[in-house]
Structure formats: structure tokens, C-alpha cells
Image (tube, rainbow, N blue to C red):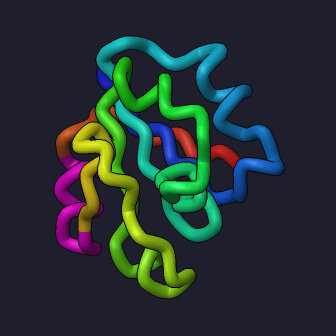
Amino acid sequence: MKTLHTINKSPSSRLLDSCLEVIDKKDGLLFLEDGVYYAWKGFQNFEFSEQYKCYALKDDLFARGIELNSLKEIKMIDYPGFVELCEDYGKIINWF
């Protein structure tokens, strides 16, 4: 079963590191709230975006004045897109 992993804390929380220890190749990553800093062009480690489907919530990016990194591997989505992701993945795990 595909799982959508949501990361809502900044990179200093190291939630992504914990998530990457258990994530499966067919799973997806969604960055929201302060988790969108993982998609920021100032964040240096994007190896995860080459291995997994990655998404960032547009409203949270804009609220923090963050430009989405030019990497095509991280897709910007809106709230209806968020709902579609929840429907597409059989399970959702929120990392806090």
C-alpha cells in the first residue's frame, strides 16, 4: 500500500531523516507548514527528491515567502491537490 508521508516541521527538526529510514520507494512526501523549507532553494540536500515523489503545499510556500526550488522533482500543489493526494495514497503518516 502506498503511503503519503507529511512533514510539517523545519529541517532543524530532522523529521525527514527519521522518515527516510522507513519510507518505501512507492511512497510520497508532502511538505507543509514549516516543512516547506525542505523545498526551499537554500536547502542543500535534495537526494530524497530523486528517489520519491515529492510535493510542497503552495499556500505554505507563499506564506513563508519561499520560492520553490527549481528542481522539477518537487511539485507545488494547492489544497484541492492535497485532497487528491490523500485519495491517491492508501495511507497517510504525519511526522510531528
Relative side of 45 to 28, left or right: right
Quadrant hosting residue 91:
top left
Q: Is residue 26 above or below residue 32?
A: above
Q: Where residue 13 sits in the image (x, y, percent)?
A: 81, 48
Quadrant hosting residue 90:
top left
Task: Locate the N terminus and report the quarter of the image it occupies.
Answer: top left
Of 88 and 21, nearer the camera is 21
Relative side of 1 to 81, left or right: right
Q: Where residue 41 sits in the image (x, y, percent)?
A: 49, 55
Q: Which residues are magenta?
A: 78-87
Magenta stretch prevailing secondary structure:
helix
Q: Where residue 2 sits in the image (x, y, percent)?
A: 31, 24
Is residue 47 inside the magenta stretch? no
User: Residue at the location (30% across, 32% down)?
Assistant: 53
Is residue 79 inside the magenta stretch? yes
User: Residue at the location (42% across, 49% down)?
Assistant: 30
User: Residue at the location (21% across, 48% down)?
Assistant: 87
Q: Is residue 39 above or below residue 2?
A: below
Q: Is residue 87 above or below residue 8?
A: above
Quadrant hosting residue 77:
bottom left
Q: How many numbered discs sit on the rendered protein?
A: 0
User: Residue at the location (51% across, 48% down)?
Assistant: 6
